[in-house]
Image (cartoon, helix red, strand yellow):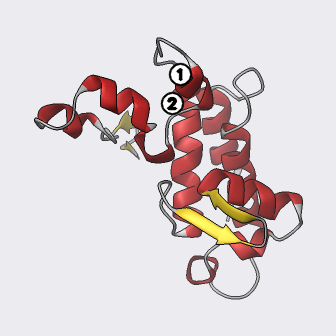
Amino acid sequence: MLAGPDFNARLTDYGLHRLMTPAGIAEQILNLGALGYRAPELVTASKPVPSFKADVYALGVILMELLTRKSAGDIISGQSGAVDLTDWVRLCEREGRVMDCIDRDIAGGEESSKEMDELLGISLRCILPVNERPNIRQVFDDLCSISV
C-alpha cells in the first residue's frame, strides 16, 4: 500500500469501476456500501461525504481481510447467526477466540503471534465509531511499532 522510502501511496479504488459501466450508476454505488469497506457513518448519511476517518475504516477492513483471508463482502455464518466480516471479527475478539478468526496458514500454525494479535487490534481500532477511530497517522505509528 505504501512504497519506497517516502511511503508513496499505492492504493487502488474498490468500487469506482462500477461508475464506468452502464449498470453502475452513482446512486447504486452509494446504496451498495462498497462490499463492506464503507464506514457506517457514510452508510447512514443522506449525503455521504468522504473523509479521512472513513478511509481509516476501510483500511481496518482491508487489514481484517489480510488476517482472516475472507472478503469484506462475505457473510459468515456461525454460532451467533450470519454476520459480516467486521462483526465476526469483533465477536471473536470479544469472546476471546482471536485465533478462530486469524487464518491458520497466515498465522503459521495453531497459535497466533504477538504481532498478529497487535495487527488485529489495530484493525479493530480502525473500525471503531467515528469519534473513537484513530487518524491515519496514529494507525501508521501503530503499524510501525509492531516489531518481529
Disc 1 crowd rating (10 Å Cα; few below 14, some 14-19, many 20+) is: few
Q: Are marks 2 and 1 in contact (CB under 8 Å)?
A: yes
User: How much space separates mark 2 and mark 1, taking CA atoms?
Assistant: 5 Å
Which x, y percent locates residue 146?
Answer: 69, 54
Vertical relation: 26 (above or below) 141? above
Q: Which residue is mark 2?
A: 55
Q: Quadrant of residue 39?
A: top right
Does residue 69 appear to the left or right of 102 in the view shown? left
Does residue 129 appear to the left or right of 60 in the view shown? right
Q: Residue at x 67, y 88 (%)?
A: 109
Vertical relation: 92 (above or below) 59? below
Q: Quadrant of residue 119?
A: bottom right
Question: What residue occupies the far bottom of the structure in this picture?
Answer: 109
Vertical relation: 24 (above or below) 30? below
Vertical relation: 46 (above or below) 92? above
Q: Amino acid at mark 1?
A: Phe
Does residue 116 appear to the left or right of 30 in the view shown? right
Disc 2 crowd rating (10 Å Cα; few below 14, some 14-19, many 20+) is: some
Q: Which residue is mark 1?
A: 52
Q: Residue at x 59, y 44 (%)?
A: 60
Which disc, if any, is residue 42?
Answer: none
Mark yes or no: residue 84 visible: yes
Q: Residue at x 22, y 28 (%)?
A: 25
Mark yes or no: residue 113 visible: no
Which x, y percent locates residue 52?
Answer: 53, 21
Which residue is nearer to you in this view: 32 or 6? 32
